[in-house]
């Protein structure tokens, strides 16, 4: 246990050096002050200082004080942030975003501790029990915040709140809780407007199942188009690559006059298989397309002149790191940040 306490004090001292931007030669507060602020005994603090001295981070001058030698404290962790990931193996979005979060948090001197969901689910809310080791780590104070790439259940969120653990969601919908979210409603509205400018009269939407709550908004936006008979036929959903191809086959099976002349697609992997299936069919059916894609995912589509909107996952990761930094520095403003997808010239995206 003594070793664990010493490690926690070392982490706190490194955090103090970094977040107060101390420089080489700056002096640390007296041990009495550190004892009160850190909540550890003199012996534990002395042991931590000794280890940081051996690591050439600090210098101890007898009867004078403790001074900073290496303010970068290379190889030492200032904070530990939990990262709860779900369905990582089937989601390019989550896989790429997880890597970018590792980079953004590491740049602040923070270590990421991942927790993986053993019951992957893309359509519902996640349960704390599905992440082995997460509850035990929280109980022991092993992480100072949690970033989640999936929505936790209300019961799980109440548990995190009871432990005063800052919990930040990154994803596609604005629900309750603190989050960095992609403003899908803005994308839908802007994408439909772009298709209308191109003469589209009967648009459809191809959406991931997790975005089903947008169905009502989509039907409302259809009121601006002249041909909206049987609107339920114009809302397609899926989660995986084959689902995009299946959506294309479903439209090809319709009589030509009932097929949409435009499709707003909310996922680039769905868009890839959707356009590939239309091309493979040789039918000549080519609806106008608006596609939402990840800026960091170099994916092309078998279609001509699509309307492209992009999401910069590195920006999402940077915003998350920035919000946590502000929370650690006493900002109690709710961590809530909408990200509006950017309309992008396709030539810029695919060049």
Image: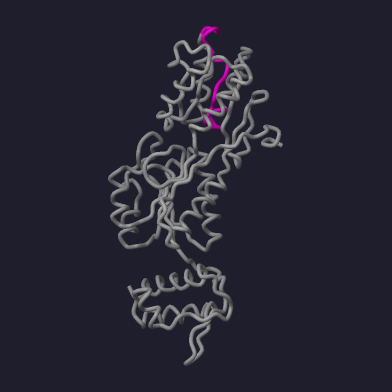
Query: Please, is residue 30 above or below residue 122 in the view?
Result: below
Query: Please, is residue 138 above or below residue 22 in the view?
Result: above
Query: Please, is residue 158 above or below residue 41 in the view?
Result: above
At 34% across and 62% down in the image, what residue appears? 141
Using residue 178 as the reference point, say whether residue 304 is left or right of it: right
The color scheme shown is: one colour
Q: Which residues are magenta?
A: 255-272
Judge by depth and name the residue closer to the eye, 282 or 344. Answer: 344
Judge by depth and name the residue closer to the eye, 272 or 180. Answer: 180
Judge by depth and name the residue closer to the eye, 243 or 265. Answer: 265
Query: Please, is residue 345 above or below residue 328 in the view?
Result: above
At 51% across and 57% down in the image, what residue appears? 105
Quick check: is 266 in the magenta stretch? yes
Using residue 84 as the reference point, say whether residue 227 is left or right of it: right
At 65% across and 23% down in the image, what residue appears? 303
- Residue 21: x %, y % from top left: 54, 70
Quick check: is 259 in the magenta stretch? yes
């Amino acid at each position: 246990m003594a070793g664990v306490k010493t490690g926690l004090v070392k982490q706190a001292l490194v955090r103090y050096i970094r977040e107060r931007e101390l420089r080489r030669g700056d002096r640390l507060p007296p041990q009495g002050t550190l004892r009160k602020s850190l909540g550890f005994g003199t012996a534990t603090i002395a042991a931590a200082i000794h280890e940081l001295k051996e690591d050439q981070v600090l210098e101890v001058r007898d009867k004078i004080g403790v001074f900073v030698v290496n303010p970068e404290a290379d190889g030492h962790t200032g904070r530990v942030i939990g990262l709860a990931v779900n369905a990582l193996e089937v989601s390019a979005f989550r896989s790429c975003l997880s890597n970018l979060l590792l980079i953004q948090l590491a740049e602040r001197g923070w270590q990421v501790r991942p927790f993986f969901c053993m019951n992957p689910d893309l359509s519902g809310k996640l349960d704390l029990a599905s992440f082995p080791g997460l509850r035990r780590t929280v109980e022991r104070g092993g992480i100072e915040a949690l970033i989640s790439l999936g929505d936790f259940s209300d019961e799980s969120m109440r548990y995190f709140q009871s432990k005063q653990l800052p919990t930040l969601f990154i994803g596609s919908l604005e629900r309750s809780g603190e989050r960095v979210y992609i403003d899908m409603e803005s994308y839908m509205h802007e994408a439909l407007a772009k298709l209308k400018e191109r003469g589209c009269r009967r648009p459809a939407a191809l959406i991931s199942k997790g975005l089903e709550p947008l169905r009502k908004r989509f039907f409302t936006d259809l009121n601006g188009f002249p041909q909206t008979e049987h609107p339920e036929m114009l809302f397609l959903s899926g989660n995986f690559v084959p689902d995009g191809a299946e959506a294309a086959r479903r439209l090809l099976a319709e009589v030509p006059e009932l097929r949409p002349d435009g499709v707003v697609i909310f996922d680039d992997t769905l868009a890839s298989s959707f356009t590939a299936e239309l091309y493979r069919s040789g039918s000549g059916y080519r609806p106008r397309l608006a596609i939402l894609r990840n800026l960091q995912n170099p994916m092309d589509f078998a279609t001509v002149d699509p309307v492209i909107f992009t999401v910069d996952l590195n920006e999402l990761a940077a915003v998350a790191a920035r919000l946590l930094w502000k929370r650690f520095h006493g900002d109690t403003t709710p961590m809530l940040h909408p990200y509006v997808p950017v309309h992008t010239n396709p030539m810029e995206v695919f060049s």
